[in-house]
Image (cartoon, helix red, strand yellow):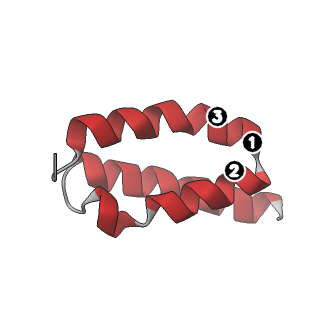
Amino acid sequence: MKERELLKLEGTIRTKMEDIKKQRISVKDSGMGGLMNSLRKVDEALYEKILPEYKKIVTDYNIFK
């Protein structure tokens, strides 16, 4: 994956995380699991950086608790 594609993937993930925070979209409907798995395959370090933020959002902002 090229650097540009990686940056686009990271931007998509961060945008969806923000949408979940603002409850515009649910965690289930966001497709974050697939995006995170794709990121993990491409860049493990970035995945490890984003994962704690993602886990916090899922526990704090999940609509279907």
Residue type, mark 1 in image: Glu
Q: Residue furthest right?
A: 2
Residue marked by disc 1: 44
Discs 1, 2 touching: Cβ within 8 Å: yes
Residue 59 percent location from the top left of the image: 28, 36
Q: Nearer the viewer, residue 60 or 1?
A: 60
Image height check: is 46 above or below 28?
A: above
Q: State the mark number for residue 40.
A: 2
Q: Residue at x 33, y 39 (%)?
A: 57
| Residue drawn at 24 percent across, 35 percent down | 60
Tell me the residue at 22%/47% (across/down): 62
Q: Kindly state the secondary structure of the residue where label 3 is placed.
A: helix
* Amino acid type assigned to the residue bearing label 3 in the image: Glu
Provide residue 33's location: percent of width, then percent of height.
49, 58
Residue denoted by label 3: 48
Disc 3 to disc 2: CB gap under 8 Å: no
Q: Quadrant of the C terminus?
A: top left
The answer to which image quadrant residue 25 occupies is: bottom left
Is residue 55 rendered to the left or right of residue 10?
A: left
